[in-house]
Amino acid sequence: MKFMEYTIEQETFEKLAAEIAQLKQERNAVILAHYYQRPEIQDVADYIGDSLQLSQLAASAEAEVIVFCGVHFMAESAAILSPDKIVLLPEERAGCPMAEMVDAESLRKRKEELPGVQVVCYVNSSAAVKAESDICCTSSNAAKIVRSLPEGEILFVPDVNLGKYLARTIERPMHFWPGYCNTHDHVRREDILKARQQYPEAKVIVHPECREEVWQEADYVGSTAGLLAYAQHSEAKEFIVGTESGILHQLDKIPGKKFYLASQQLICPNMKSTTLAKVRDALRDLTPRITVSEDIRQKAAMALDRMMEASK
């Protein structure tokens, strides 16, 4: 299934791709793109990945300029991990509604209500929230991160769906923040059942940001990178996919297999707001730049560094 409203003409693509390649060389830049980006963005990126993969790449990048094709919290994480580099977010308004569902002041108040609680912060959050957290996690390493912590209560922010998925398999006293991903939350159990009727031989693979009623119906639950790996190695030939539509660009490259979105609403407008022209302009003008104040950066870096260490 293709979303033609997010594609461009081949001639335009080739022109912009050539300009981007030239500017990238001149700026000593690297382009990182999330799996949810438009197909043409993925095609010009040096690296494509999920949040954990891109965080690791941002931390180890030798380039002087990081062009982050994603949303604001991702570019902030790159700026936290690489303070000596220029971090560009081609579409400055590309935010994350879930990240905006928690703020530092509210988190501080909740911590006061739960003295001694350990805060596990999903990377889909602001730098200020990370600075108030003990450790960060992604959907691909969340279980490993929680298991690495000492005994005691855990406050998981901000994604309640991912938190509940963790609680299903990890016996720890956990408190959940009432946040959620607007895009993944669109999928309902009825969507999965309807898709199963239409494609009875297909495996259902979904992201843990989906509702509990959805991942309970799935054959496999995992991060975007996890979904790709499962599809590549599974003997199944058809898959019903419960995550943002951008992943289809990579899934469709797997030979001999077919993929169907669980819902037509699995499109994140923020992820799709980055265009090739904006990437070109960002490299040309070295704006918009994403920076984090040093006091916040140092505290947030501790939470991210702990995640990276625990993920080894």
Image (tube, rainbow, N blue to C red):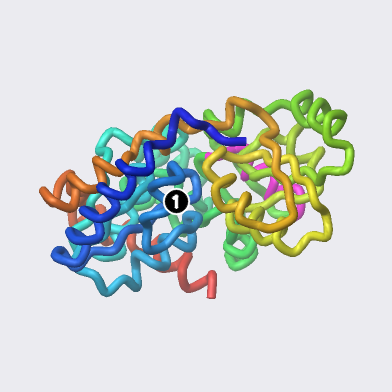
**Residue 61 belongs to the span the image colors magenta:** no
Q: Who is closer to the viewer here, 140 or 226? A: 226
Q: Is residue 20 above or below residue 199?
A: below
The picture places residue 26, in percent across and down from the top left corner, at: 14, 65
- Graded by Cα atoms within 10 Å as few (under 14), some (14 to 19) or many (20 or more), the crowding at tag 1 reads many
Q: Who is closer to the viewer here, 287 or 236? A: 236
Residue lying at 37% horizontally and 57% vertically, measured from the top left: 45
Residue lying at 47% horizontally and 34% vertically, measured from the top left: 98
Q: Is residue 108 left or right of residue 64?
A: right
The picture places residue 170, in percent across and down from the top left corner, at: 73, 56
Kindly identify which residue carries mark 1: 34
Residue lying at 41% horizontally and 44% vertically, measured from the top left: 125
The picture places residue 179, in percent across and down from the top left corner, at: 53, 33
Q: Is residue 122 left or right of residue 291?
A: right
Image quadrant in which the N terminus is located: top right
Count of marks, rendered view: 1
Q: Which residues are magenta?
A: 159-169
Note whether residue 83 is visible: no
Badge 1 element: strand
The picture places residue 311, in percent across and down from the top left corner, at: 54, 70
Note whether residue 3 is visible: yes
Magenta stretch prevailing secondary structure: helix
The quarter of the picture where residue 300 lies is bottom left
The quarter of the picture where residue 25 lies is bottom left
Amino acid tagged 1: His
Residue lying at 34% horizontally and 73% vertically, measured from the top left: 60
Q: Is residue 36 above or below residue 191?
A: below
